[in-house]
Amino acid sequence: MVKRWILRKSGRRTLYLRREPTQETAPENILRSLKNGDIVSGEFMQVIRASREVGFVNVQHLEPQCGSSWRIRNAHGTTSTLLRKHPNDSNDAPNTVGYATEGELVVGEFVFVKYQDDKRGGYVKRRHLKAMDNDKNSDHTQASHSAAMLVQQRWTVMDASHDGAWLRRAPQAGCGRDNVVCLLANGDTVVGDFIYIRRVTGESGFARFKDLEGDGKTWRIRSAAGSATTVLRKRPKDGHEAKDMLCCAGEGERVEGEFVFVTHKNGRRCGFVKRRYLTALLPAAAHRGASMHTVVL
């Protein structure tokens, strides 16, 4: 079953199904106009390698980076991924351009799709495509999301000098009434994966705690997945759309930040707590159902 997408686009500009994967919007390159909510199907994106080879890769083997950059992450765990000449499932030599290696960075923007029962397909920008909930991979995606929730980083609040720590609305030191959600008592458990950080170049965004190495306010980027770059997000949540991504920080880059975004009481309260008032807890799931252990990180 081919992957299905629902079209999503903000603003008033028209969505186009293009003949060729280019920015050109002249009539000769437009097959039809599309609108928000239309359903299309397709699973191959045209990408360009650093070697300038151009071909099609199944979207399941691509991990978003920043903008139109993607990293090869083969869904089947192989060390290389087929780059096809045409956007179809054929593995024959005439349809082979080459092989991209695991972890390789490529550039791509257009996915080859078909609209309803049209026999001829065209190209739509990936950022306008949202995977359908009833896609063949949705069960796996949902299961992965649920599993991720089970192993979210958990923390216990502990400020030895006071009765607890402030849960703030914004990642800033002010503790006036307009910036305080509540006081978290020592021993309270909160959940959160993201720290608000600032690069030396001025950009500020959210990075996963597991992708940072250090203590206090100064950190070094250390991707848990071994990537050369780590995504800084606009919001403290997972997202694979370009709109969710702010920029990429390079491996080893130094950044600053002291506020962790956390939720409390099953999400009924959320906000920022200073990292120094949080002691990391190792999820029980990591020990196959063993009781929760406290780990100082």
Image (spheres, helix red, strand yellow):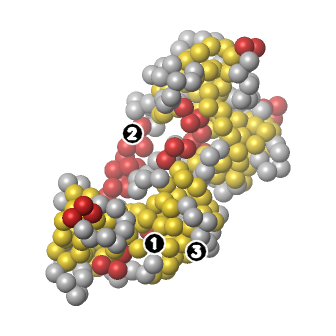
| In the rendered image, the vertical position of residue 114 relative to residue 118, given as above or below | below
As shown in the figure, which amino acid type bears the numbered disc 2? Asp
Using the rendered image of the protein, determine whether residue 222 is visible from the camera's viewpoint.
no
Q: Where is residue 48 in the image (x, y as percent from the top left)?
A: 76, 43
Element type where label 3 sits in the image: strand
| Residue beneath the point at 59% across and 70% down | 200
Element type where label 1 sits in the image: strand
Which of the 4 image quadrants contains residue 228?
bottom right
Count residues near mark 1 (Cα–Cα under 10 Å), then give few for <14, some for 14-19, many for 20+. many
Q: Which mark is residue 151?
A: none
| Residue beneath the point at 53% across and 50% down | 245
Residue at image mark 2: 139
| Residue beneath the point at 54% across and 72% down | 255
For residue 33, side relative to residue 104 (left or right): left
Q: Position of residue 159 (x, y in %)?
A: 24, 82
As shown in the figure, which amino acid type bears the numbered disc 1? Gly
Dividing the image into 4 quarters, which one contains the C terminus?
bottom left
Residue at image mark 3: 254
Q: Nearer the viewer, residue 293 or 125?
A: 125
Q: Nearer the viewer, residue 221 or 100?
A: 221
Using the rendered image of the protein, determine whether residue 104 is visible from the camera's viewpoint.
yes
Lower position in the chain sequence, tag 1 or tag 2: 2
Residue at image mark 1: 257
Count residues near mark 3 (Cα–Cα under 10 Å), then give few for <14, some for 14-19, many for 20+. some
As shown in the figure, which amino acid type bears the numbered disc 3? Arg
